[in-house]
Amino acid sequence: MRRRDWLLSTAAVPVAVQAQPASPKNIVISSANGTKACEKAMSVLQAGGDTLEAVVQGVTLVEDDPNDTSVGYGGLPNEEGIVELDASVMHGPTRRAGSVASVRNIKNVARLAKMVMENTDHVMLVGEGATRFARAWGIPEINMLTERARMAWMAWKQSLRDREGNNNWTDGLDGLDAPTPKQAATLRQIWPEASDEMIAWAFDVARFPTTGTINCLALNAKGEMSGTTTTSGLAWKIPGRVGDSPIIGAGVYVDQEVGAAGSTGRGEENIRVVGAHTIVENMRHGMDPKAACHDVLQRIVRNYNGDQKKLNRFDINFYALRKDGAHAGASLWSGRPRRGGYMASFQYSVNDGSGPSRLEKCSWLLERKA
Ligand code: ASP
């Protein structure tokens, strides 16, 4: 393309966005763990509530759920057994943003990120400063580590080995494969009530830490948009590790004129392509939500020169909601192997106000063989 043509095509970009059908409607999308969150957010929109308040109320349900081990209370801890949470929010109408990272002892960090946005002149607070900010506003501090998450952490500590097979958290003579009957017996001593299934889950999650997180994006009938992402981050991370979720532009991004995007999965990859912002920019330049997400997935593939062996070691998903209500969920891989030997495909949750949320299949870039 000649330079002049390029300039002309760039100049034409706002026209491409304006040309989209201008009939906004209430719609909420999220990662697959957010069916209830989308319903909650939709009820706030239908009652005339603000789009950011809607998504924060939605994800609060997931943060409160002890059974979601990737978000809020019950989230899997860092390598020292301490839960550290990250979250971000972005409000389309005011173009403001807030975020918190590496927060300990506070359950509802999406709400805390919104408070940073609304009640400070800053965008991001981290660690002890974020906890103190919460304390100043009277937010109660609690122990975020559930017994279930502690069990998985203990299983992880027992599964670590040096080259000789030693581990100071075991007697050092067990084999390399976890769980050995002996390790399982140790866990059972600490948690006598635990079922076999629960112990198997703990060892499973210790060896193959689940990725999770919730990203939730909303559009209302006035065409206003907002988004949030909240997570306990990567299980067994180094204390202080911050993922993509609280990074404005990576974990979430909203541009009131164009659309919103967010991500779940391996944050290190997302930060390097600033995924959410790149998706929104792609939509601004005329790509539909799916194409916008796939372009970002391609950038991740390019970062590893297409080496599928390396790419196969992680998962990452993107979600996009355009200002006219068009949406997409897209994953790097076609599915993820689950215990029981089957391949689970990636999905995302959609609520258009007509009833319960539905799960739609994410499109994908690479086919994963079992
Ligand atoms: N994106 C999150 C992080 O890297 C983790 C996840 O979604 O699984 O912290």
Image: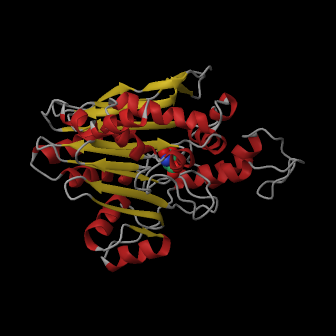
Furthest-bottom residue in this view? 136
Residue 368 visible in rendering: yes
Residue 235 at what x, y percent from top left?
58, 51
Of 342 and 261, nearer the camera is 261
Q: Residue at x 45, y 58 (%)?
A: 86
Query: In the figure, 294 relative to 112: above or below?
Result: above
* Percent position of residue 25, x then y: 14, 36
List the single residue furthest toward the right.
164
Q: Position of residue 236 (x, y in %)?
A: 62, 54
Q: Viewer-proximal residue, 137 or 15?
A: 15
Task: Give whichever of 89, 43 is nearer the camera.
Answer: 89
Q: Position of residue 78 (x, y in %)?
A: 59, 58
| Whether residue 334 is visible | no
Q: Quadrant of the N terminus?
A: top left
Q: Is residue 48 left or right of residue 7?
A: left
Quadrant of the frame with the C terminus: top right
Q: Nearer the viewer, residue 354 or 300?
A: 300
